[in-house]
Image (cartoon, rainbow, N blue to C red):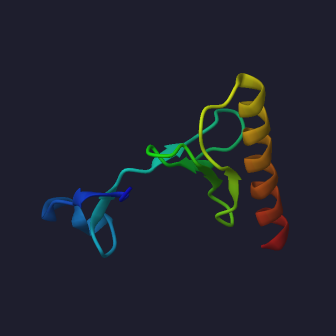
Amino acid sequence: MSWDNGDIPDKYREHYSAPYKWSKLLAVEVQDIYDGVLMYKCPGCSAIWSRFGNRLIWEGGKYSNEQWGTIVNKAIQSYLRSKTKG
């Protein structure tokens, strides 16, 4: 699956950088955990990876509520590791 969702129109390009393409990736924000994107999800295969270090935290497929909790905890751990490195 391509994550390319077409060209960004010229009138919006000043807010983006090349190659000026929209993405099909889903940005996931978890309220009260981190103010911003915590992880990304592929709409095609449902793989999820942390924004911090691009660490794969779910290989794809359906997940239960309990597994979702594990996924969020892994993303939080990636975020916390990134803070201690900086």
Q: Nearer the viewer, residue 63 or 34?
A: 63
Residue 61 pos. (x, y %): 59, 38
Residue at image position (44%, 51%) is 25
Q: Is residue 23 left or right of residue 64?
A: left
Quarter of the rendering containing residue 3: bottom left
> Which residue appears farthest toward the bottom when viewing the image?
18
Residue 59 pos. (x, y %): 65, 49
Q: How many marks?
A: 0
Residue at image position (77%, 57%) is 78
Q: Is residue 32 above or below residue 60?
A: above
Quarter of the rendering containing residue 43: top left
Residue at image position (38%, 55%) is 1
> Which residue appears farthest toward the top when viewing the image?
65
Residue 38 pos. (x, y %): 63, 48
Residue at image position (58%, 48%) is 47
Q: Is residue 37 visible?
A: no
Residue 32 pos. (x, y %): 70, 33
Quarter of the rendering containing residue 54: bottom right
Q: Nearer the viewer, residue 16 or 44?
A: 44
Rendered-image quadrant of the C terminus: bottom right
Q: Is residue 65 visible?
A: yes
Q: Is residue 17 left or right of residue 8?
A: right
